[in-house]
Each structure stands twice: as C-alpha cells, then as structure tokens.
C-alpha cells in the first residue's frame, strides 16, 4: 500500500490531478498505519502473518 500511495502522489503531482493526490495521501497513511501495526507484532485484520 505504501508503494501504491507514493505512485498516486507522484502521478497526482506531475499530472496536476488533485483527486489522485488526495487518494495517494489517504492510501499512504493507511499503509503506514498497517505497516507499523504489523511491525510491532499486532495482528492486523485477524491475521498474524500475511503470506
């Protein structure tokens, strides 16, 4: 999710599409939260491991 968020941010900035910029920020924040929760060992979505 972090990579998709970064891609949306870059495309939104380069192409000047504000909705893509907003979606990129939202996806980036959600991805960062999930990454932090997974890094501390907390199960995310009822699963401890994602394979």
Image: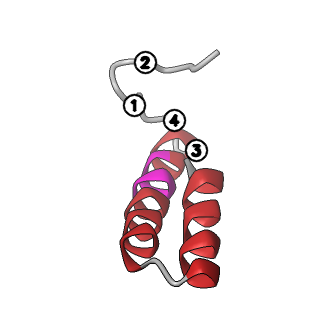
How many marks do you count on the picture? 4
Distance of mark 1 from mark 3, alpha carbons?
10 Å
Badge 3 element: helix
- On the image, numbered disc 1 is attached to which residue? 44
In this rendering, is residue 13 above or below 36?
below
In this rendering, is residue 2 above or below 8?
above
What is the x, y in percent for residue 45?
A: 34, 26
Of tags 4 and 1, the one toward the viewer is: 1
Rendered residue at 52%/39% (across/down): 38
Distance of mark 2 from mark 4, alpha carbons?
10 Å
- Asked if the residue under mark 1 is in contact with the one under mark 2, i.e. CB atoms within 8 Å, the reply is yes
In this rendering, is residue 39 above or below 44?
below
**Magenta span contains residue 19:** no
Quarter in which the C terminus is drawn? top right
Give the extent of the magenta segment: 30-34
What is the x, y in percent for residue 19?
A: 36, 71
- On the image, numbered disc 3 is attached to which residue? 39
Badge 2 element: loop
Of tags 1 and 3, the one toward the viewer is: 1
In this rendering, is residue 29 above or below 15?
above
Q: Earlier in the sequence, mark 2 or mark 4?
A: 4
Rendered residue at 59%/52% (across/down): 4
Classify mark 1: residues with Cα within 10 Å, few (<14), some (14-19) or many (20+). Answer: few
- Asked if the residue under mark 3 is in contact with the one under mark 4, i.e. CB atoms within 8 Å, the reply is yes
Write down the quadrant of residue 29 in the picture. Answer: bottom left
- On the image, numbered disc 2 is attached to which residue? 47
Distance of mark 2 from mark 1, alpha carbons?
6 Å
- On the image, numbered disc 4 is attached to which residue? 41
Which of 39 and 10 lies nearest the eye of the viewer? 10
Distance of mark 3 from mark 2, alpha carbons?
13 Å
Badge 4 element: loop
């Amino acid at each position: 999710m972090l990579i998709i968020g970064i891609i949306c941010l870059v495309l939104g900035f380069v192409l000047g599409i504000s909705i893509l910029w907003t979606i990129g920020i939202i996806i980036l924040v959600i991805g960062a939260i999930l990454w932090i929760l997974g890094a501390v060992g907390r199960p995310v979505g009822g699963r401890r491991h994602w394979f």
